[in-house]
Image (spheres, rainbow, N blue to C red):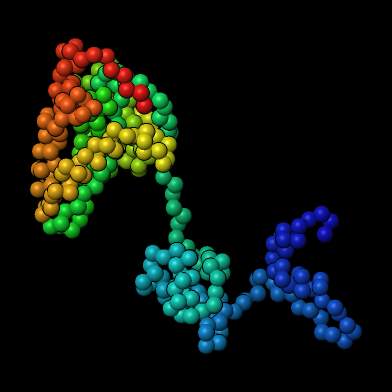
Amino acid sequence: MLGHEIRKLCYIVELPRASFYRLTSATVHKGDPPLVLISRKHNSYSYDLDGAQYDDNALKDLLKKIVASEGYNYGYRKLTFCLRMHHRIHINKKKVYRLCKESELLKPARKSRHRAPRMLARNRIVNGPNQLWQGDIKYGYIHGEERNFYILSFIDVFDRTIVGYRIGKNCLSQHAGQALKQGLMKRQLYNRDQELVVRTDNGPQFTSLKFASDCHDLGVIHERIPPKTPNMNAYIEAYHSVLEDDFMQQMIFESFEEAMTKLERYVKYYNKVRIHGSLGYLSPEQYNNLYNQGLLPPVEIRL
């Protein structure tokens, strides 16, 4: 075919490749009827298990009925499933796509969600508070309401203090910014120059343009760990493990208000009272106070 692919040529002239190969491979004898090529523009038929015949118009009417009832929000793949399973019609998804397109039944294509550019997390040395915070999200369960709730927390890697957190029935990007702002105000860093790095995973709350904008406005450097590397966010992961063992597994919540009240009480206990072996058996608040008084030997955390 002069160097052109048969597949492309058949596509241009809208000729099924099966018809082309049938024509080229057939042995024509004198008196045989001529071969008739089937064009894609010609109406084709589909059949159900009982042998009933459906032309394109009948299939379009059937698709419109499905869309008008239970399939009002279905895409062409689900409509194909309905034709096969509920109406027992032999049909493939490509034909259903064509029929839906001709009948203007296709759903609009999903808009791609814009993400903030990622600054990849790198190895760092932490030798004081407010140099590196880690953030992540954990969910709990409210038995009385049969629903989940969410806990978004930021921890200071140096002294293990939960500097900011939010408890809510949902967890959106603006909530991450609010918890971060809460931590800056608590540490008296709000509207001050500081070299604070906040490290998170790639959850939608942290990859959003909203959170990127909040970090920029707050003067915070935001970096994200590569996928499937939770060890690079080990300190907040360890806190969530402690939270699960110390608190979540011991509680049955009847309401969201009860869960929020008890969790706020636990965070205060964790920061002020609960001792850490890695902190010399001090609580995060005690450790931070000793550092600010210059009573701790130099410490370097490499991560």
Instruction: Classify residue 30 as left or right of residue 158.
Output: right
Please determine whether, in this image, residue 259 is positioned above or below residue 180: below
Please determine whether, in this image, residue 44 is positioned above or below residue 265: below
Using the rendered image of the protein, determine whether residue 79 is visible from the camera's viewpoint: yes
Which residue ends up furthest to the top in the rendered image?
Answer: 294
Please determine whether, in this image, residue 155 is positioned above or below residue 103: above
Q: Quadrant of residue 86?
A: bottom left
Instruction: Classify residue 89 as left or right of residue 20.
Output: left
Which residue ends up furthest to the right in the rendered image?
Answer: 30
> Which residue: 54% across, 74% down?
91
Q: Tell which of 242 and 94 is nearer to you.
A: 242
> Which residue: 27% across, 41% down?
137
Q: Where is residue 209 drawn, in percent x and y?
A: 36, 36
> Which residue: 42% across, 33% down?
118
> Which residue: 24% across, 13% down?
297
Instruction: Classify residue 251 as left or right of residue 87.
Output: left
Name the quadrant of the C terminus: top left
Q: Where is residue 150 drawn, in percent x and y?
A: 22, 46
Q: Quadrant of residue 136?
A: top left
Please determine whether, in this image, residue 266 is positioned above or below residue 292: below
Q: Where is residue 237 drawn, in percent x and y?
A: 29, 38
Q: Where is residue 105 drawn, in percent x and y?
A: 46, 66
Name the quadrant of the N terminus: bottom right
Using the rendered image of the protein, determine whether residue 178 is visible from the camera's viewpoint: no
Instruction: Classify residue 265 as left or right of residue 138.
Output: left
